[in-house]
Every structure is written in structure tokens, then in C-alpha cells.
Image (spheres, helix red, strand yellow):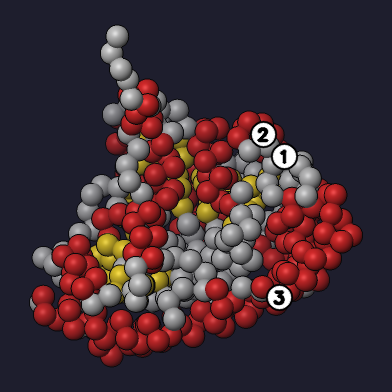
Amino acid sequence: MAHHQPEDLFSVNARGLKPSAIEAIHKLLEQPGMRSLAGAWPDPLVFQTDEIAAIIAELLDKQGDQALQYGSTRGQPVLRQALADMASTQLGFECSPQQILVTSGSAQGLDLACRLFIDPGDVVLVGLPSYFGATATIASHGGINVGIPLDEQGIRTDLMAEKILTLQKEGKRLKAAYVIPNFQNPSGVTMSARRRTELIDLAERFQFMIFEDDPYGELRFEGGHLAPLATLDTSGRVIHFHSTSKTFSPGMRVAWVAAQAPVIDRMERLKQASDISTNSLSQLVLLELIRSGRLQGGIERNRAHYRGKRDLMLGLMDQHFPKEVHWTRPSGGFFTFVTLPQDMNSDDLLIDALEQSIAYVSGPSFFVDGSGQNSFRLSFSQASVEDIEAAIPCLAGLIKKRL
């Protein structure tokens, strides 16, 4: 009888999983002395640690039974009401508490949506470039990521329309488009109001869903608020994912999904089979921060903090980077995206940078079509001011050597 190793029994899906770029970033950040412009994480300096500690102590004293117990799969009812109120007053779209599902991070929300809508072989349109965590989730459910180029106004809806017609001719089934309209990861660009309307129109015309991921929208540094796609939706095609990881705490793992009630009902069943419920204590902490106004106060401090680091990074790039290099100028969020001359490889440059203890994320991780070899993402969110001041001039020197 043949002896089988556990890996011989892996599912077809598991066998197809590739190493995550997120794992590689974690390893880079663990190296001592690394000046990392790679991690797209919040700066611990803005965490409301003392306030959260005080809230937790009070919750355990007064509501310990509830805070430490299993909760509703859909989420704490009082928190869902507070989130529905926020959606109306701050984001501009109406939804009831029954149209909200509290999830363990937006990553779980997208995973549930993929489980609900994506069959193996279904197509999901994504940006070129796009967040690799999302494209990996889509692929893990058998979805086929098809890339659509971006420009300074976001995803190219004209090219999207052309691609949809090609997919129809090829007999492929389009199920959804995944977009980050505000300060997109990794490009930093924001989808214009016109493109948002055009995307909604395309979803109506060709009958597909829109997965709207909005982890950075509240971190706008300048310009006016743009209506979420959920605001423009009149037929229930938009599933809105809203993370608190960038404004509250990534470690608390609280996010929420807003969609039509039948969609949320099914997602709730899928979540119940996955993890039963989201962390009760984290939900109650977030609720208290919302009720007291301290969440909004923290967001305003975050904006000022990250705006300062963005201005520092872009100013140093203007001063030191050669004219042959181009980069985006985000009006919010965590990143800028750099494009090198066509014949320069960002992976080769990264080898030089790592020798100088500087890290970034090379472009190909973000391009589902295998392109992007001459691009990379720089994150100003977690890096210290000192690391930005040291890394950007050094990186510029390495680029100049390769020109």
C-alpha cells in the first residue's frame, strides 16, 4: 500500500495556491534595520491605544458577559445601527442595519462575496494594477482575474466595455468587477465621478456585480468627497466593503459589508459556517468610539499625520528622482506608484535596494497579466519620517545608476 503524505491529499484549489506577496512583505519587515516602504499598514503612532485600553476595562467591568460571549453572526445590532447611520451621514448612501454584515476584516467580506457569486471559470474584472490580496482571493475560488488598465481617473471604463464584448464572444461568464475607487492600492489614484457613473451603467447593461472595496476613503487629504458606488446603485449590484483597519485598528479585525438584504442574508449563512461571528469585544470597542465621537477625532488626526508623510515623500521624490521616472500623486490613502523607464526592471532594482536595507513592493505582484516589471509601490503610511528621509534619496541614487 502506497504511503501518502498529507500534501498528496490537498484539494485541487489548495494545490493551486501560490505564495502570497503579503508573506514576502512580512519577512522584509522582520529584517533588522530595514527601512521599509513596502508595508501598506497603519502607523502605530496613530493607534488610540490608551483610549481603547480604557474602553476595554470599562466594557469588561460593566458588560463582560456580552463582550466575552459569542455574538450574532450578522454583528452586534447596536453597532450595525451605528454603521448604518454613518453610511447615511458620512458616506452618503442609505442602508438599514439588516443590510449590514460585520466581518472579520474586509478580507473576509470579499471572501464571502466570492463564495456567494463566483463559480470556477467565472471572470472578475480588476484593475491593472490591483491589490494582490483581492486577486488572490478571487483566484482561490476559481475565478479568472481579467485586468483592465488604469489611468489618473481610475479604471478605464471604455476599455472595460471593449473587454466585456470580447469575453461575450469567447463565451466566458462575467460575474463581477473588483475596484478600490478611493486612493487605490497600489496606484493611489481615485476614480472620477464620471467613471463611477460609467461603471454602474456597465454593470446594469451587462448584468454583473461590483465589489466596491473602500478601506482608505476616510483618509482624504484634499478635495471633495466623491459618492461611493453604493450611492449610485439603483438595482442592488454593488457590494460595499468598508474596513476599519486603517482608521481604528487592523488587529481588532472589524469591518462591514453593505448590500441588499437577500445578499447579506446569504453572506450571513456563509459566515456562520466559517467563523460563527466576529469578535464581540472588538465590535463593542468600536461602537463606543463611534458613540463618543472619538473615532471621528482619531480619523481627523490620522489624515493630518499621513498627509504630512505623503508630502514629505513626494517632496523628496520631486527633489531627488530623475526626470525619466514618473509617479502618482495621491490625494489620500497610503501609497504612491512609481513607473520606471520601460527597459528598467523593478525586481533588479529591489536587489540593489535591499543591499541598502530599503524595501518596496515590485510591480508584477499587482498585475494579473504578468506586466508591470518597470513599476513598484512605495508606501508612506507605516514608514517613519526618518526612514523616508533616508530611503528616498538613496533609492533615487540607485535608479540613476541603472539609467
Q: Is residue 86 left or right of residue 323?
A: right
Label 3 sits on what residue type?
A: Asp
Label 2 sits on what residue type?
A: Gln
For label 1, the residue is 73
At 38% from the left and 38% from the top, the residue drawn is: 139
Q: Residue furthest top?
A: 1
Q: Is residue 38 left or right of residue 53?
A: left
First of labels 3, 1 by sequence position? 3
Q: Is residue 308 left or right of residue 48?
A: left
First of labels 2, 3 by sequence position? 3
Asked if residue 44 is positioned above or below residue 157 in the image, the reply reads below
Q: Is residue 347 left or right of residue 360?
A: left
Nearer the camera: disc 3 or disc 1? 3
For label 3, the residue is 50
For label 2, the residue is 272
The numbered dot on residue 62 is none
Quarter holding the N terminus? top left
Circles 2 and 1, Cβ within 8 Å, touching? The answer is yes
What is the quadrant of residue 220 in the picture?
bottom right
At 68% from the left and 37% from the top, the residue drawn is: 276
Percent across and percent down for residue 147 are 32, 47
